Image: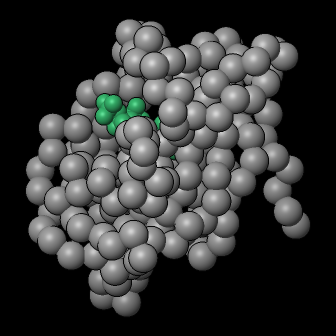
């Protein structure tokens, strides 16, 4: 699963370099100047039987194929982070959300010093107010999960370190550095006690 993600992202590296309008320059973990693509992700929450559920999806193609992720993707030229979150949500799930109904929960950075083209910054949003109908997408196999049963073992390794706090109503921040295997976080922000 993770090997396939690797080869896909390689092919996309030229695309990520072109999208500098939505990217910020930072210094990589190796000290090089680099430009990180910006993505926005939106976690929809709903109540069912007295429990809170979150909408996630298994990536069916492209970067991160096989991983369970929140609906989201790269900013398009001129888009705000909230606009990108709403657009990607509609494209990937069929659900509509007003940008005013999006709760901004912070920005997390993923660094891959051994594969710079995979590094990115993710703007995290949550919403409980949405409309429309869930549609099948060729990008994500969607599934609602109880927030206490999120399948972290099938997600990017960083998610288990910051997503529980976001789903509990908190914020996310900091930089997560992946190791040589491109699958394991080797440096993460120290959790606040
Ligand atoms: N380290 C990481 N941790 C995480 O939890 N989700 C990640 C992640 N890295 C990427 N994602 C998810 C967030 C979002 O769902 C998606 C964004 O990557 P994509 O390259 O698929 O963006 P796009 O949907 O814009 O791609 P295209 O539309 O194919 O250009 O991947």
Q: Residue at x 59, y 74 (%)?
A: 168
Left or right of 145 on screen, residue 124? right
Q: Which quadrant of the figure contains the N terminus?
A: top left
- Looking at the image, which residue is at 24% across and 67% down? 96
The residue nearer to you, when weighing 147 against 30, is 30
Is residue 6 in sight in this rendering?
no
* Left or right side of 5 for 24: right
Q: How is the image coloured?
A: one colour
Can residue 57 be seen here?
Answer: yes
The residue most toward the front is: 78
Nearer the observer, 188 or 29: 29
Q: Position of residue 148 (x, y in %)?
A: 50, 68
On the image, which quarter does residue 140 sit in?
A: top left
Q: Quadrant of ligand 1?
A: top left
Image location (x, y in percent) of residue 154: 44, 40
Residue 140 left/right relative to 189: left
């Amino acid at each position: 699963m993770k090997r396939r993600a690797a080869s896909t992202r390689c092919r996309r590296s030229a695309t990520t370099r072109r999208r500098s309008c939505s990217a910020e320059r930072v210094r990589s973990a190796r000290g090089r100047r680099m430009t990180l693509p910006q993505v926005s992700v939106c976690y929809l929450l709903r109540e069912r039987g007295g429990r809170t559920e979150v909408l996630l999806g298994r990536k069916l193609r492209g970067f991160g194929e096989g991983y369970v992720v929140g609906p989201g993707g790269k900013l398009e030229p001129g888009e705000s982070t909230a606009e990108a979150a709403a657009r990607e949500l509609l494209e990937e799930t069929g659900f509509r959300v007003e940008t005013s109904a999006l709760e901004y929960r912070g920005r997390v950075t993923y660094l891959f010093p051994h594969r710079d083209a995979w590094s990115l910054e993710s703007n995290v949003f949550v919403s409980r107010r949405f409309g429309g109908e869930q549609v099948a997408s060729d990008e994500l196999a969607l599934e609602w999960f109880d927030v206490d049963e999120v399948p972290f073992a099938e997600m990017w390794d960083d998610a288990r370190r910051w997503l529980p706090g976001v789903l509990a109503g908190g914020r996310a921040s900091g930089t997560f550095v992946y190791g040589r295997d491109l699958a394991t976080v080797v440096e993460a922000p120290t959790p606040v006690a």
